[in-house]
Amino acid sequence: MTDGLVGLLGLTFDEASGDRVVIRWKVRPELHQPAGIMHGGVYCTVVETVGSVGGTLWLGDRGSVVGVSNQTDFLRAVREGELVAVGTPVHRGRSQQLWQVEITDAEGRLVSRGQVRLQNLTRD
């Protein structure tokens, strides 16, 4: 899980299961928006990544998942440091899953919060 966008963003997985996913990364200038703070798209990407990894692990060999909705709030501006995202399932059903993700800074302050709805694509 270090290729593609995950690798470009420098995301590191500390924990990954069908019940909980923890990702950390360093804020750096290439991830800033023009005002010099973390770009909101990075938060959205992390929310989607956390939920998709957890949802895929939970679904296992029954199929795969795709995101159908991502709603992410930006609560605190961040210019530097390390951020940690923790995702847990809110709902896991036959056809869809809902994962909640909280992103905190090194002081434990909530900087972003989001949820991603996933469609389960089960194999017949």
Image: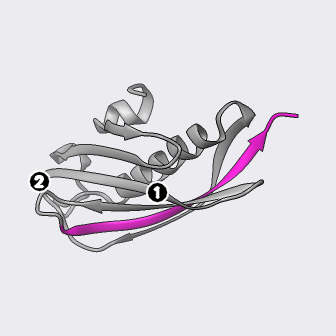
The N terminus appears in which quarter of the rendering?
Answer: top left
Q: Looking at the rendered structure, which numbered label has been put on residue 88?
A: 1
Task: Give the residue displayed 49% in from the left and 49% down from the top.
Answer: 19
Residue 50 to residue 15: above or below? below
Q: Looking at the rendered structure, which numbered label has been put on residue 7?
A: none
Closer to the eye: label 2 or 1: 1
Q: Residues within 10 Å of mark 1 (few under 14, many from 20)?
A: many
Q: Position of residue 17 (x, y in %)?
A: 47, 40
Task: Give the residue displayed 34% in from the left and 36% down from the top.
Answer: 13
Amino acid at circle 1: Thr
Q: Is residue 76 left or right of residue 44?
A: left
* Label 1: element kind: strand
Specify the segment rendered in magenta.
109-124
Task: Give the residue displayed 70% in from the left and 30% down from the top.
Answer: 61
Separation of disc 2 and disc 1 at Cα?
A: 26 Å
Amino acid at circle 2: Glu
Residue 74 lies in quadrant: bottom left
Q: Mark 2 or mark 1, which has the lower sequence index? A: 2
Between 98 and 112, the one lying in front of the other is 98
Q: Position of residue 11 (x, y in %)?
A: 31, 38
Task: Tell whether position 87 is magenta.
Answer: no
Q: Position of residue 62 (x, y in %)?
A: 74, 35
Task: Give the residue displayed 41% in from the left and 35% down from the top.
Answer: 5
Q: Looking at the rendered structure, which numbered label has been put on residue 80?
A: 2
